[in-house]
Amino acid sequence: MAPIGDFVAAFFVIGLFSFIYRDNIWYKFAEYTFVGVGMGVTITVAYWNVLNQTIGPIVNNAAYIFVPALILGFLTLFRVSRNYGWISRSSLAVMFATTMAIRVMVTIQSQVVQQILPAIRAPIINTDPITGISNLFAATGLAAACYYFVFTRVDMPRTIQRPSDWFAKYGQYVIMAYLGASYANVMTGRVSMFIERILFLCRTFGIV
Amino acid sequence: MKISDFWEKYYRQVLYTLMIALTVFVFVNPIGLPLVVMKNSIDYYEAVESLPPHSIVTVGVNYGGGAWGEVGSANIAFIKHCIMKDLRMVFYSRYVEGPLMLEKVIAGAGGKEALGEYGVDWVNLGYMAGGEAALASMMQSPDGWHKTFEYDQYRNKVSDLLLMEDLWDWQDVDLATEFITGSLLPVVNQWYVPYRTPIICSAIGANTPETKMYYDAGQVVGYLGSMRGSAEYEKLTGFYADALSSVEALSLVLFLAAISIIVGNIEDRWKGSKNISTGGR
């Protein structure tokens, strides 16, 4: 016998699935309840987070280094005010600047340098044929995708064909293949969600 | 009503009904489709398997209820794997729903007792705001973890926990594990680039291509991609949750989707539709 909470969850899941037929009051009720509960969880977690991680250290350990952060965090609440919303900009400016400072250098390392080096070093000849072809495709695909962006000139008449245009076209196909694979993965994820909920319903109602 | 008119009007309902029927059928009558374990999943498994007992593993539970089907099973199997290997686990979350999901995972892994003594064998540090800045702060010498987390999820002082006496900065982390719905980039940026911390990751489908990119570049030791990856890990560890049974349904439903796309394209071509370039309905 499933606990009562599972039946409540099943009520909302079926309500959300009822949208497959058409929009209805059961679906709307389930949707609004989900949004409300989600908001409640977020606010509660944020409240305890500020209390534990910021106010706690200030009060208990005299860690006054957190005071500017607390003030800046408080100022962001002014975003809800039409007249005083501008006050929150200083907090946002600090957030953006800090994030940029933390990210920029390491992102160049992780996304550019450490991606290019393995592509160059990947063995093409002294390995098994499948890995070799795969590595060749990855290396040329990387170069072609970069070439597609870097050397595309929008001011050039479309009738003029450069000798290297085929390489840019190859880069375009590589990008399209990546987007296709990404979309297929997203779709797989959504179907996984759907299957997990069906399994949940089956268990709740004793089908499996 | 003609069949074509019925299809035109109710194609969505028909497809969903077929999907539900296929899924329920597979759950009631498992087919036993073969599942090939990919190298990335083996590397993920080996990364845990190669750790000596009492190693410290950080576990980032960074997903919500929507991702449960994709990474929840892997998370349960991972905890059981760590218990079997006698590893010490430090849970944290950058996702608001993370602590809630962790409670569900712990229940699935046999309850808190199964994880060992709290504060000695495992610790739940709870949610931490701040995103990438918080990640950078955790690993900093000499006491990043203690400065970032003052209290744990259950309001214990972190400095009072025995396990945390062995976890101060990047040098104490033997393996970082991430269960994610968002990008892995912040973790790679702040943990791999400066400190070369070994990272393994279980990602949802939408983030799998990006995670593979880090894996191919050697920035990630191993990864599990979506529900299929979870099923592969369940097969490797022998700790079965839901993924291995669900992945059969996934295969059939995706097969149905592929057939639908092909049939839909043929139908559109047959009719000489002018809307082909605008995509699906």
Image (cartoon, helix red, strand yellow):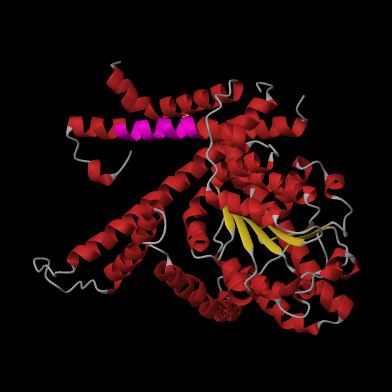
Indicate the quadrant containing the C terminus of chain A: top left, top right, bottom left or bottom right. Answer: top right
* Main secondary structure type of the part rendered in magenta: helix
**Magenta residues, as a range?**
B251-262
Q: What is the quadrant of residue A169 in the picture? A: bottom left
Residue A12 in the image, given as x and y percentages of width and height: 63, 34
In the image, residue B258 lies in the stretch drawn in magenta: yes
Q: Compared with residue A191, is residue B188 higher up or lower down, i.e. above or below?
A: below
Residue at (44% x, 35% y) in the render: B254
Count of number-bearing discs: 0
Q: Nearer the viewer, residue B247 or A196?
A: B247
In the image, residue B152 lies in the stretch drawn in magenta: no
Residue A60 in the image, given as x and y percentages of width and height: 89, 76
Residue at (59% x, 60% y) in the render: B221
Q: Answer yes or no: is residue B158 visible.
A: yes
Q: On the picture, is B192 further left or further right than B50?
A: left
Taking the view exactly as shown, the residue that stands out farthest to the front is A126
